[in-house]
């Protein structure tokens, strides 16, 4: 444990960008003063899509099927010959985000939307302590398959480090038996950029692929960028998606919404207007 935190501390010290990541899920018992103070009704369609549509399940299975295909290709001797000799014998690793990538927290978002409860840290922690997040369809089978092939999985999440044990318990509960303090790397001291943690993995392993529901899960080049620049960076990296980058669907929350708000903290009324202003009309 101490060695892991030392690695993280050193990696964080070399990090360049520090971004603010907004998590918007909680299903704890709320205090009455918080109910009705947020305008979350606009999220209902996205939450229902994740909870009730077969299409959402199809997309997550598709993502993990593509991931398995790419992993099998990486084990093909012909693929290995294309790598520099120094890389061929390095141990493999896969870096995955946790929330809405391997764990589904849509129940917490549903509670917020139904009762107009704003995100608050106390209730987010309480939701994590429940250990009731379910597995994203396809995730358990793929990651356990990768482990069986000798691949090291690193769960890099912007959950806070105080949530470590509850997070490990939840991961193991739904079937990720490899989850431990050794490979579950949460954020320390509220530092949200994942780039230093990814670099710490890459220092010891050959990262075969990265999986996430947010562009920030793949590279620091996407962090804190306005919408047009995020689009441009995605276009530059187009050949990596479906290969090195495997994206999972999540319309409920994410940095894409933060970009609409220009990474600020506007009022509920201002947010609603900014969302309307962001719509493209005929």
Image: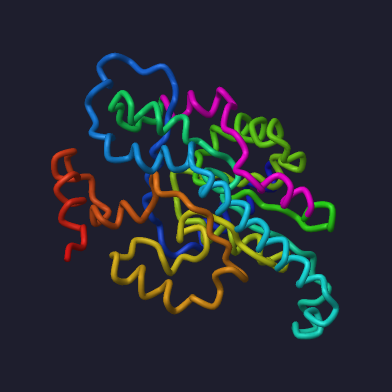
Q: Residue at x 48, y 23 (%)?
A: 126
Q: Is residue 92 above or below residue 251?
A: below
User: Number of callouts in the render?
Assistant: 0
26 with respect to 167 (left or right): left
Q: Nearer the viewer, residue 250 or 2?
A: 250
Q: Residue at x 42, y 76 (%)?
A: 235
Q: Is residue 161 magenta?
A: no
Q: Residue at x 40, y 49 (%)?
A: 251
Q: How is the image coloured?
A: rainbow
- Where residue 137 appears, as percent x and y from the top left, is 62, 44
- Where residue 237 appears, as percent x and y from the top left, is 49, 76
212 with respect to 35 (left or right): right
- Where residue 197 appears, as percent x and y from the top left, is 57, 57
Q: Is residue 137 magenta?
A: yes
Q: Nearer the viewer, residue 182 or 130?
A: 130
- Where residue 38 appears, as percent x and y from the top left, is 24, 31
Specify the quadrant of the image occupied by residue 76. bottom right
Q: Nearer the viewer, residue 196 or 59?
A: 59
Outermost residue toward the top in this view: 32
Query: Would you say the magenta stretch is mainly helix, strand or loop?
Result: helix
Identify the magenta region.
123-145
Q: Is residue 256 above or below residue 53?
A: below
Q: Quadrant of the N terminus?
A: top right
Q: Residue at x 72, y 50 (%)?
A: 143
């Amino acid at each position: 444990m101490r060695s892991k935190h030392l690695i993280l501390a050193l990696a964080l010290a070399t990090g360049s960008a520090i971004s603010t990541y907004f998590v918007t899920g909680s299903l704890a018992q709320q205090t009455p003063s918080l109910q009705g103070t947020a305008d979350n009704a606009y999220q209902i369609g996205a939450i229902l899509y994740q909870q009730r549509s077969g299409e959402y399940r199809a997309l997550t299975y598709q993502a993990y099927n593509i991931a398995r295909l790419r992993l099998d290709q990486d084990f093909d001797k012909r693929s290995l010959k294309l790598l520099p000799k120094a890389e061929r014998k390095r141990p493999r690793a896969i870096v995955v985000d946790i929330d809405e990538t391997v764990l589904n927290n849509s129940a917490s978002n549903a509670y917020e939307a139904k009762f107009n409860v704003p995100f608050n840290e106390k209730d987010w922690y309480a939701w994590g302590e429940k250990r009731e997040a379910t597995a994203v369809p396809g995730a358990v089978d793929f990651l356990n398959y990768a482990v069986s092939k000798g691949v090291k999985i690193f769960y890099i999440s912007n959950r806070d480090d105080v949530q470590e044990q509850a997070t490990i318990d939840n991961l193991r509960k739904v079937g990720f038996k490899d989850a431990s303090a050794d490979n579950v790397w949460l954020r320390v001291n509220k530092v949200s950029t994942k780039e230093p943690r990814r670099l710490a993995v890459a220092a010891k392993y050959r990262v075969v692929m990265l999986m996430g529901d947010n562009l920030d899960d793949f590279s620091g080049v996407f962090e804190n960028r306005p919408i047009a620049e995020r689009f441009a960076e995605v276009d530059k990296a187009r050949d990596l998606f479906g290969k090195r980058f495997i994206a999972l669907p999540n319309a409920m929350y994410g940095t894409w919404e933060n970009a609409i708000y220009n990474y600020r903290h506007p009022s509920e009324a201002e947010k609603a207007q900014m969302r309307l202003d962001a719509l493209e009309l005929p």
